[in-house]
Amino acid sequence: MASFFIPLNKKMNFIKIILTLFLIPLLACSAQQEETNKFIEITYSARTRGYQMTIIYKEDKLTVSSNISNKTISLTNKQQVKIQKEVSKIVLSEINNLKAPSDKRFIDGTLSASLKIKNNSGTYISSDFDHENPPKELRFLYLLLESIIKKG
């Protein structure tokens, strides 16, 4: 019977302790999940026997290099958010199984391309596809990178 008559301030302290014990791990897991999903680097590579082109997104820069030229573009916050949004739509663990919509690369009709996305949980590399014609799951990310380069 005496336990029902605990002073109010002691009950409040007990509730605060219990809430703290439950909320700290919950918030820590949430922050860790967010950090795991944050990606670090994107590399688009297109190549054939005598030519290679690479587009690298890292931090706030987009670097385009080829046998002919090199160019670095500083990205705005808006562009970075758009890139991150497009990457978040991709199931990274599945990109190595994506089917290319065409196969001109097999007869030297176009460059052979691939996309690599590196984040805190690993490195994910797509199956090869024809340059400028990625699988539909990667298409919007590719088009976004190309549009930034053209404006660049």
Image: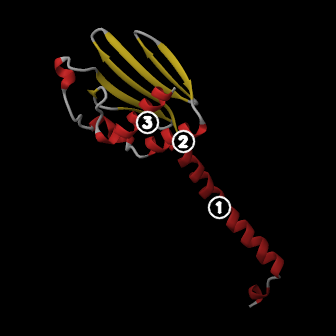
Looking at the rendered structure, the secondary structure element under dot 1 is helix
Gap between marks 2 and 1 measured at Cα: 29 Å
Q: At which x and y percent is residue 94?
A: 32, 41
Circle 3 or circle 1, nearest the eye: 3
What type is the residue that disc 3 sits on?
Leu
Given residues 71 and 9, the one toward you in this image is: 71
Looking at the rendered structure, the secondary structure element under dot 2 is helix
In the image, residue 87 above or below residue 13: above
Q: At which x and y percent is residue 17?
A: 73, 66
Q: Which residue is mark 1?
A: 23
Q: At which x and y percent is residue 145?
A: 44, 32
Q: Residue at x 44, y 42 (%)?
A: 86
Gap between marks 3 and 1 measured at Cα: 39 Å
What type is the residue that disc 2 sits on?
Val
Mark linked to residue 41:
none
Q: At which x and y percent is residue 3?
A: 75, 85
What type is the residue that disc 1 sits on?
Leu
Relative side of 10 to 107, left or right: right
Residue at the extreme front of the image, as rendered: 151
Q: Earlier in the sequence, mark 3 or mark 1?
A: 1
Q: Which residue is mark 3?
A: 144
Q: Residue at x 66, y 57 (%)?
A: 24
Circle 2 or circle 3, nearest the eye: 3
Q: Which residue is mark 2?
A: 81
Q: Residue at x 74, y 68 (%)?
A: 16
Circle 2 or circle 1, nearest the eye: 2
